[in-house]
Amino acid sequence: MNQRSYLDHNATAPLRLEVREAVIDALALSGNPSSVHTEGRAARAAIERARVQVAKLVGAKPENVIFTSGGTEANALALAARSGEAWHGYLSAIEHPSVLSGGRFSRETTTIIPVTPEGVVDLDVLRKTLEEHKPRGWRPFVSLMAANNETGAIQPVAEAAAIVHDAGGILHSDAVQAAGRIPLDMTALGADMVTLSAHKIGGPKGVGALVLAEGVSVEPLIKGGGQEGRRRAGTENLAGIVGFGVVAGLAAADLTKMDAIAQLRDALEEGVSALCADAVVLSAGVARLPNTSCTAVPGVKAETLVIGLDLAGVAVSAGSACSSGKVEASHVLAAMGVAPEIAQGAIRVSLGFGSENTDIQRYLSTFGALVKRLKQNAKEAA
Ligand code: PLP
């Protein structure tokens, strides 16, 4: 049995062993991938191998993969291209902060598209808004994530893409959480651009990609050398990119294990409901990522639970994992209209390749004891 139960894969996943070995080997590659000599060509070949592996994960052409420093930069690159006056941004209310506050669109040139109480974008609102805005002559740029990082709710990207394309616009999808957890195919999604990040699926931190559909171009954010087809300057993060390629291959093969992960997730939610009749499972009524569960017990503060669980060897997040380590109100749960006393108690459990039944049992026994104690304390204080 593992000493600790790491159940926070949506924040980041532990580096997979095979990836670590490949990264260490790649660190020994001495050449600059842009150099024409033997050492340079060896480094270039490693990058191009990784490009093929990453492209395969989303059914894209390798030449349409632009490596970046992660999901955040890939989102910024996608948004940057459409920040001119002719464009208007339509962003779902539950996008990651790197899309919502990427600073690419001013308030006047952005419209937020709401979500349903289950956390799925409201396509009727999107359709109506695009129709209403038609006379203004804007080109729509829509950003709709493939699945949400807090609730796991899968978004109707293909349907949204059809609506956007009918309106003459383009659609970007942040698939950072969906990749490697559900099958993804650029053509089936209908997305013009897709964002990926290596570290959510056991790759290195600090590497990601923006993947383009055929014929779609971007304006570089970082200008300089001609790397990445003149779309992202700077000597490539060779070891990171190699690790991303390896993990993309592993993740594609591991999609078959996602049913087992979903069973663990379901067992966890059944256990939580058995321990607390008033527990709420967010987005329970819609299709979700197999690895993600967001539950709340009204009146029980998430921070208290997160600390108690951590002390007992279980790592989870309170609502959204904030980079600052602070627990802030979740904009996702607020957009879903979740009552503050429930949102304040929202715990996100996110499973991954190493998760086992013993992790779920450890979570449930600790959670049960903590909730019992906290409810007892609250009763005594009342
Ligand atoms: N998009 C989503 C949905 C995420 O969950 C994250 C990470 O939390 C990002 C983008 C940012 O990715 P990165 O950490 O690689 O910058």
Image (cartoon, rainbow, N blue to C red):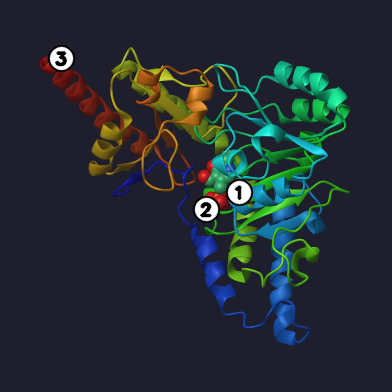
Q: Identify the residue at image location x=69%, y=70%.
A: 46
Task: Give the label on residue 145, or none.
Answer: none
Q: Tell me which amino acid carries mark 2.
A: Gly
Q: Which residue is mark 2?
A: 202
Image-based side of 297 in relation to 243, left or right: left
* Residue 284 placement (x, y as % from top left): 51, 19
Q: Is residue 175 above or below residue 217?
A: above
Q: Residue at x 15, y 14 (%)?
A: 379
Q: Residues within 10 Å of mark 3 (few under 14, many from 20)?
A: few
Residue carrying label 3: 379
Question: Residue 250 or 377: which is nearer the viewer?
Answer: 377
Q: Residue at x 60, y 28 (%)?
A: 93
Say which label, 3 or 2, has the lower sequence index: 2
Which label's residue is closer to the chain start, 3 or 1?
1
Counting from the top left corner in percent of width and height, residue 264 is at 45, 31
Q: Is residue 145 in sight in this rendering?
A: no
- The reply to whether callout 1 and callout 2 are in contact (CB within 8 Å) is yes
Instruction: Indicate the secondary structure of the residue bearing disc 1.
Output: helix
